[in-house]
Amino acid sequence: MSSTVELLERFPDAEDYCRLRADAGMATRTIEAARRGLANTLYGVSVVREGEVIGMGRIIGDGGCFFVVVDIAVAPEHQGQGLGKRIMGALDAWLRANAPPSAVVSLVADGEAKHLYAKYGFVETTPHSVNMEYQVDPADARPPR
């Protein structure tokens, strides 16, 4: 890993965010959604190499009761170099310094990433609770409740 790799305490702009999500194989987001959502980041980091964003992670939430770790991504050609650990280390340090003792910190772990998150104290909550989600889609014709 080159010495020019830096972890910066700022989150990428919407364009880099969308590019890195796609590069890392994550679900894509529209540039409009990214611009709206990123403005609500409580804390975020970027991993930059020679001016290019190659990794990221951020925290969202209400700032008191609930915090959610999201958007952990490293470009595929830079994976396996400990950058995910650097990202999580920075996010974890910020949470421990800023989240109240009663706060709940959560995340959704995809695949084997759960092993990385376990190193930072995250535990699986099933069957007590399960992650549930849906993606908003204007063409979605869900029946009203």
Image (cartoon, grey):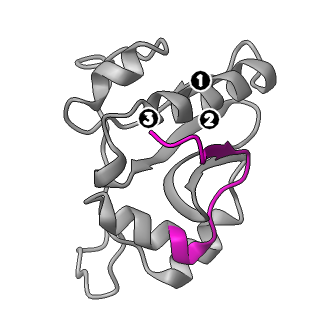
Magenta residues (range): 1-16
> In the rendered image, is residue 111 in sight?
yes
Q: Residues within 10 Å of mark 2 (few under 14, many from 20)?
A: some
**Residue identified by numbered label 1:** 104
Query: Where's residue 20, x and y in %?
Result: 42, 64
Q: Amino acid at mark 2?
A: Phe
The answer to whether residue 73 is above or below residue 99 is: below
Query: Foreground mark, 3 or 1?
Result: 3
Tag count: 3
Residue 5 is a magenta residue: yes
The answer to whether residue 111 is above or below residue 58 is: above
Contact flag, marks 3 and 2 (Cβ < 8 Å): no
The answer to whether residue 95 is above or below residue 144 is: above
At horizontal 66% and vertical 56% (from top left) the residue drawn is: 11
Q: CA distance from mark 2 to mark 1?
A: 6 Å
Query: Foreground mark, 3 or 2?
Result: 3
Query: Where's residue 39, x and y in %?
Result: 71, 66
Closer to the chain start, of discs 3 and 1, is 3
Residue 144 is a magenta residue: no
Please, which residue is most extreme toward the bottom here? 139
Contact flag, marks 2 and 1 (Cβ < 8 Å): yes
**Residue identified by numbered label 3:** 84
At horizontal 23% and vertical 74% (from top left) the residue drawn is: 143
Q: Amino acid at mark 3?
A: Gly
Query: Where's residue 40, x and y in %?
Result: 70, 59
Q: Amino acid at mark 1?
A: Val
**Residue identified by numbered label 2:** 67
